[in-house]
Image (tube, rainbow, N blue to C red):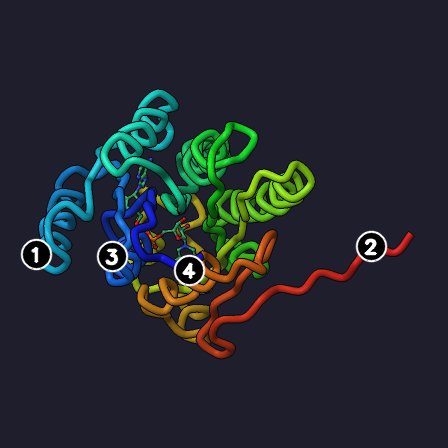
Amino acid sequence: MALYRKVALVTGGAQGIGRAVAEALLKNESKVALVDLNTKVGEDCKKVLDQEFGEGNCIFIQCDVADRGKLKDAFETTVEKFGKLDIVINNAGINNEKNWEKTIEVNLTSLIKGTYLALEHMSKEYGKDGGVIINVSSMAAFLHSPHQPVYTATKHGVIGFSRAMADAAEEGDYGVRINVLCPAFVDTPLLQSIEQEDNMGKFIKYKDVFKEKIHKYGVLQPSQIAEGMLKLITDSGLNGAVMKITCSKGIHFHTYEPLSA
Ligand code: NAD
């Protein structure tokens, strides 16, 4: 898929990884809807992107992805503004072991809703022209961590759901590819949340184990994640792919053994 004049919706697009992806898409002349909970950060982000890429290429929509009605409206607003939808990046995520139900709601339930809404706007099943969905998981889905049990569970869930949906898309000829991105540690505000008791609850006591892991594996920049994201979007051969990005190996793919009978 070429990115010129494509329309993308990015949840959690106002900062961190989402913002870097939005920038990369705008650089490639796509139109972008930043869908984010945080009004101040979202408006500031849009202002900077408008200055860099010109007005009219980017909109900010304040929305809690956990609010089903608001998320539906965000998709509709994007299509009303730009006339279509080609790319959906379900990226919004939180790290909260204290309010773990909320973590499941934002990281997994809302990502599922985002995927279904994306299909309503892009799948041939609904008479649309096709597109691509990228769901953001994490290397936490591969590395067990004593400090983030529920976060880890949600990121496993993202992979299982997305791969099954990628099969459904292929079987059902949706014209939509569905891929997963698993970054290792990335230099964003989310990474700092491991130091906060409000986020980690009783698992805060393992924060030094976590910091040792960060030290061992290193920290990526959001722009490196955006580079992987663009590959997942543009490579039309990728469906059900699980991309990993780490400091030691860079961009690479998880391989799955075929099931033997
Ligand atoms: P971040 O905290 O920097 O940015 C997340 C954005 O999502 C924020 O702008 C926030 O306002 C928004 N958001 C949070 N809850 C929301 C909600 N309910 N509705 C709408 N928007 C909401 O985080 P990040 O590091 O950029 O993380 C982005 C994604 O990458 C997440 O899914 C995260 O789990 C994943 N990830 C991050 C890392 C890392 O080390 N930073 C590593 C692997 C995976």
Q: Does the residue labelled 3 lie within 8 Å of ligand 1?
A: no
Residue 6 versus residue 47: which sits nearer the camera?
6
- Residue visible at 34% across and 46% down? 8
Does 152 sit left or right of 68 as displayed?
right
Mark toward the start of the polypeptide (2 vs 4) = 4
Q: Locate the N terminus and report the quarter of the image it occupies.
A: bottom left
Task: For mark 1, give the secondary structure.
Answer: helix
Mark toward the start of the polypeptide (1 vs 3) = 3
Mark toward the start of the polypeptide (2 vs 1) = 1
Real-space Cα separation, disc 1 to disc 4, in angstroms:
23 Å
Checking the image for residue 229, the label placed there is: 4
Which amino acid, mark 3?
Answer: Leu
Find residue 54 and report its horizontal and vertical position in percent.
11, 54
Does 221 sit left or right of 118 as displayed?
left
Checking the image for residue 51, the label placed there is: 1
Mark toward the start of the polypeptide (1 vs 4) = 1
Checking the image for residue 90, the label placed there is: none
User: Which residue is disc 2 drawn over?
Assistant: 259
Real-space Cα separation, disc 2 to disc 3, in angstroms:
41 Å
Mark toward the start of the polypeptide (3 vs 4) = 3
Does 256 sit left or right of 73 as displayed?
right
Task: For mark 3, give the secondary structure.
Answer: helix
> In the rendered image of this protein, does residue 50 appear above or below residue 213?
above
User: Which residue is disc 3 drawn over?
Assistant: 26
Task: Answer with the quarter of the image where residue 220 lies.
Answer: bottom left
Which amino acid, mark 2?
Answer: Leu
Which amino acid, mark 1?
Answer: Gln
Which label sits in the foreground, 2 or 4? 4
Which amino acid, mark 4?
Answer: Met
> Few, some or many C-alpha atoms within 10 Å of disc 1 (few <14, some 14-19, many ≥20)?
few
